[in-house]
Image (tube, rainbow, N blue to C red):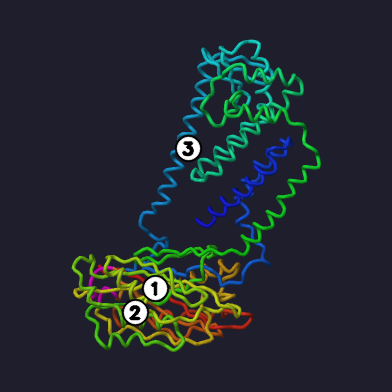
Amino acid sequence: MATYIIQVIVIQVLFLAVYDFFLSKETFHGYNRWYLLGTPILSFVLPFVKISSLQQSVAQDFVMYFPETILTAQNNLSQESMSAVSSVDYLNLLYGIGVLFFAIVFCVKLYKIIRLIIQNEQIDKKFYKLIMLSKQSKAFSFFHFIFLGKNISEDKQEKIIQHELVHSRQKHSIDLLFFEFLRITMWFNPMIYIYQKRITLLHEYISDSEMVKTTDKQDYFNKLLSEAFQVENVSFVNQFQKQSLIKKRITMMKKNKSNPFKKAKYMLLLPMLASILVYTSCEKSQDIIEVPVQEKQTNMNVTEVDKLPTIMVEEVVLDYDSTADDANRYVPNEGDFGSIVQYFIHKNFKKELLNDESLNPSKGKIYALFTVDKTGVLKDVKVRAPSPSLKEETLRVINMLPSIEPAIKDGKPVGMTFTLPISFYGAGERLSTAKQVSQKVNTNPKDVPMNIVEELPIYPGCSGTKQEIMDCLNSSIKSFVLKDFDASMAQNLDLPSGRKKIYVVFRIDETGNITDVNARAPHPKLKAEAVRVASMLPKMQPARQRGKAVGIRYTLPISFSVK
């Protein structure tokens, strides 16, 4: 979102630069009006326009978190909410406060206009309604309402009304309300305020140009300068006389009509639009998704493709009372980056930090994100942890990772972001089945990561777009587990009360069969049940990469509560 906002502002700067330097001094007021109204809309649309032939060929850019299934000991099954409960987003809070403030300011201004209409004398005319303001010398218009102070001399009133009628007939109030709406929604964008000033001045140019067609210019100048009018402090009404604009208005009225050939200046939009489209099509954002410290699985929208390709490394479990046998559960497989990272973290993390009495509870999670850029350099390490000491230790260990070869896409190195969940157990909360954590599923070197495979495996009965197939696959597997998993056994296994997890990992091989099923669970019987249910999944259409069937690995987290 930050990237999009910056792009919008930069595009608006370019559009305004063209207007100020090339168009604002011309007398093509009608064209300029549509330019000032159309270019803000274009600035919001252009960042979404992608020309496929210009786009970089990069892996799909999203974080893949598989949906989680919740099981209770009473066999009351439900799906856990997949939306992340994050800490307060202060930027969004600030934005919301700004929107609310400017919306209130707008409502107050609108109320002032309505009150002037109600409290003052109204004279109905054929094309407008004249509001006579007692003891005032204001002159302005809002839609078909023309506000005129009674203190204005009668010989000037008719010309002022004619001037304001131009605003009314040409619906200038709609233009101003359009920019008021933009001011509310993008109150932090200085370009919107500049746009509003430009359109306000242009409205006066338009009205003045109509007036001098039927009035002597010098006489009209004198009327503008001869009397000091009050100004209504409302940004979305057309003021007859605003002192800061008088000089510019007179200068414009003195200009000769622009040569029609100068309309060619609007052609400057074409190369600028082409440059913007090249940039928006080729540019890719380097935003990093921060994962909140919590146990819920986050389901990111696959259409969020403005981020580096991201892989989720399998969870590492750290126990304060771990033994040499426990360390052996993380044996790095040659060429398997995920297992190497797991082994490195488990080996180098100072586990004595887990015996911190201030940690509440004494078990929890750390989430780390880091990027390996296209040169193999590790950077942008971000960590969320329940204590500063654990955060510092996680940063230390990750920054110690050995040199890394970058990911390759279509023969070219690309950057990739990794998200690493780390579960830990303090001295008083040791996981009773730590020694029984399963070995990693056998990984075929030809397997393709789930998040970058071109064609996903298809569960029987699923069809549609890639996203629809993914949603159907996840929900179907979830429904299958909910139906067949015997959750009642958990109540008879003497497990401590609270929320527990089972992680099931399996391959959907090149033929679509479920193979290499393994699980990590807090009790052997739960592990066996998870393996049994996953092994019963039906045969699917295999995933495909470049037209060939490939295997992929699927991780299914299962949560259940013991009371």
The residue at which mark 3 appears reads as 103
Asked if marks 2 and 1 touch (Cβ < 8 Å), the reply is yes
Q: Secondary structure at mark 1?
A: strand
Which residue range is magenta in the image?
A: 490-498
The quarter of the picture where residue 263 lies is top right
Q: Position of residue 424 (x, y in %)?
A: 28, 74
Residue type at mark 2 is Ile
Residue at the disc numbered 2: 345
Marks 3 and 2, how far apart at CA: 50 Å
Q: CA distance from mark 2 to mark 1?
A: 10 Å
Depth check: 562 or 401 in front?
Answer: 401
- The mark closer to the camera, 2 or 1, is 2
The answer to which of 44 and 317 lies nearer the viewer is: 44
Q: Residue furthest top?
A: 154
**17 part of magenta stretch:** no
| Residue 198 in the image: above or below residue 434 | above
The mark that comes first in sequence, 3 or 1, is: 3
For badge 1, the amino acid type reads Leu
Residue 158 at x, y percent in the picture: 67, 15
> On the image, numbered disc 1 is attached to which residue?
420
